[in-house]
Amino acid sequence: MRTSRTMPPLQALRAFEAVGRLLSFRKAGEELLITQSAVSHHIKQLEETLGVRLFVRKAKSIELTIEGADYLGRTTEAFGIIAGATSEIRYRAARQRVRVSVLPSFAANWLVSRLSRFMIEHPEIEVDLEPTLGLTTFETGDVDLAIRFGAGQWDGMLAERLMNEELSPVLSPTLYGDGSRFARPADLLAQTLLESSKPVDWQLWCGEAGVDYRRGRILQLTDYNIVLQAALNGQGVAIGRLHMVRDHLSAGRLVQPFAHSVRSDRIAYWIVTPKGRRPAPAAEIFASWLKEEAASPPSPPR
């Protein structure tokens, strides 16, 4: 085997680093699992390659020469860099990844603020969030699980309930004060009602409140994130998904004019996976963590 003109044999370098660190041919051989004579051979080969003496051999000890001490420092540094790179690449290879398709509103208003806890508990798992409004089909295999909002019925999918949502109108105090001007639910119909592309929220709340929401002035927006931002800007009244707006209510950015809220099996968050395919271990760990977070009481206002 040919050796490089600029690079000495790696085995000789390993022997030199061990001898230089331990200042003992015997101990270096024990560490490297080779004989003492093999260590001596490697050191002699290295000295011949470099053209300098690396050690001063005495009766019962050895010492590094000036050149040897300098070379040891460089060699130790180089081995440290290699060891660090090796450790890093092994760590990356050992890391697991869970890819999650999630509604943008759920990601922004509930999930992201909690993710740091998962990262602390499971540093070996990397979470990839894919915010999207569309229902994931899982056909391409680039998503492990999805978090969706609705009644939990999607063809070809397994849906495990994460948590029920609770609905009640919310509005900006900048425009509406504390909301006390609305004595009855029907008073809201004089305002712009903000709704997402699927108006089940208003239908459910107004149905229980005995109000025909279709008599109101409705502004339909694509995503609940946009609905929420429009409400914060004072552009109308939104149905608050209370898990999503809790921080805004606590901070006074939104107010809830009526104590009455609605729960229904049609409005829940679900962990969705394809039938016939068991989730990867990282996805199962993440799903279990999600359920623990959903069952935990909300954090106090900051």
Image (cartoon, rainbow, N blue to C red):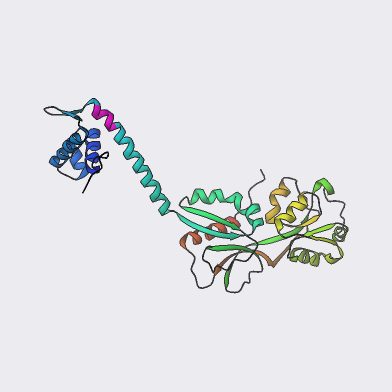
In the rendered view, tell whether residue 278 sits above or below residue 126: below
| Image location of residue 122, percent across then percent down | 48, 52
User: Observer-nearest residue: 257 or 281?
Assistant: 281
Q: Main secondary structure of the magenta part?
A: helix
- Say which quarter of the image contains residue 301: top right
Residue 76 in sight: yes
Residue shown at 31% from the left, 39% from the top: 79
Query: Viewer-proximal residue, 154 or 36?
Result: 36
Between residue 72 and residue 95, name the one nearer to us: 72
299 in relation to 44, above or below: below
Residue 53, placed above or below residue 281: above
Residue 8 in percent (x, y) is at: 24, 40
Residue 68 among those drawn in magenta:
yes
Q: Residue at x 58, y 50 (%)?
A: 114
- Quarter that holds the C terminus: top right
User: Residue 186 appears in which quarter of the rendering?
Assistant: bottom right
Whether residue 295 is visible to the viewer of this picture, yes or no, is no
Name which residue lies at 53% across and 67% down: 140
Q: Which residues are magenta?
A: 67-72
- Foreground: 284 or 302? 284
Can residue 287 be found in the magenta stretch?
A: no
Q: Residue furthest top?
A: 66
**Left or right: 31 as drawn, with respect to 82:** left
Residue 27, by quadrant, is top left
Number of on-image labels = 0
Rendering coords of residue 112 (x, y %) = 60, 51
Q: Determine the residue located farthest toward the left in the rendered image.
A: 59
Is residue 233 rendered to the left or right of residue 109?
A: right
Question: Going 12% across and 40% down the picture, which residue do you hit?
Answer: 37
Residue 187: give x, y in percent of width and height. 88, 58
